Amino acid sequence: MEYRTQNMDTTWMKWLAGVALGALAMYISDPSVGRQRRALLKDKMKHYRLHTQKLFNSRMRDARNRMAGLQAEATRFLAARKPESSNPQVVDISSHVQASPESSAPNKAAGWVAGAVAVGLLTWWATSRRS
């Protein structure tokens, strides 16, 4: 029974990578058309760098806009939950009762906002993978 070792696989991959690197060096440094190939490679690298930069900027703008939307939604949600002082049926008992950390409104709101941010980021991530 033969056993392969990691060393044999690594040696084979290193040899193959060396051959590919040598072929690439020969292809790029060819005296007859090497200059043209290098110029083409430089242009392609510049194009892909600018394309990647544009894509990154658009994704960041999308994420920033989604966060602004989530912030506006959270602000609207929290503003709707505040009791109005003009309503005589609403009694403010916060000065009489010490609120526990589990039941305090800021903690609940923070949990809701964190959940909304997580859902927004997951939605953005899922939709950005399609394009």
Image (tube, rainbow, N blue to C red):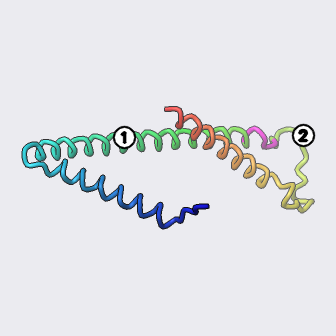
Q: Residue 105 or 60: which is nearer the viewer?
A: 60
Q: Residue 106 or 8: which is nearer the viewer?
A: 8
Question: Looking at the picture, does residue 21 appear above or below residue 119?
Answer: below
Q: Residues within 10 Å of mark 1 (few under 14, many from 20)?
A: few
Q: Which residue does the numbered mark 1 point to in the structure image?
A: 54
Q: What percent of the width, then of the height, locates residue 128?
A: 53, 37
> What is the secondary structure assignment of the residue under circle 2?
loop
Q: Is residue 103 left or right of residue 78?
A: right
Residue at image point 78% right, 41% down: 81
Q: What percent of the width, then of the height, locates residue 3?
A: 58, 63
Q: In the rendering, which numbered label is found on residue 88? A: 2
Q: Amino acid at mark 1?
A: Lys
Tell me where residue 76 sits by quadrant. top right
Q: Main SS of the magenta segment?
A: helix
Q: Amino acid at mark 2?
A: Pro
Q: Mark 1–mark 2 contact, CB under 8 Å? A: no
Q: Residue 130 or 91: which is nearer the viewer?
A: 130
Q: Earlier in the sequence, mark 1 or mark 2?
A: 1
Q: Nearer the viewer, mark 1 or mark 2?
A: 1
Measured Cα–Cα span from mark 1 to mark 2 = 56 Å
Question: Looking at the picture, does residue 13 appear above or below residue 109?
Answer: below
Q: In the rendering, which numbered label is found on residue 104? A: none
Span colored in magenta: 79-83
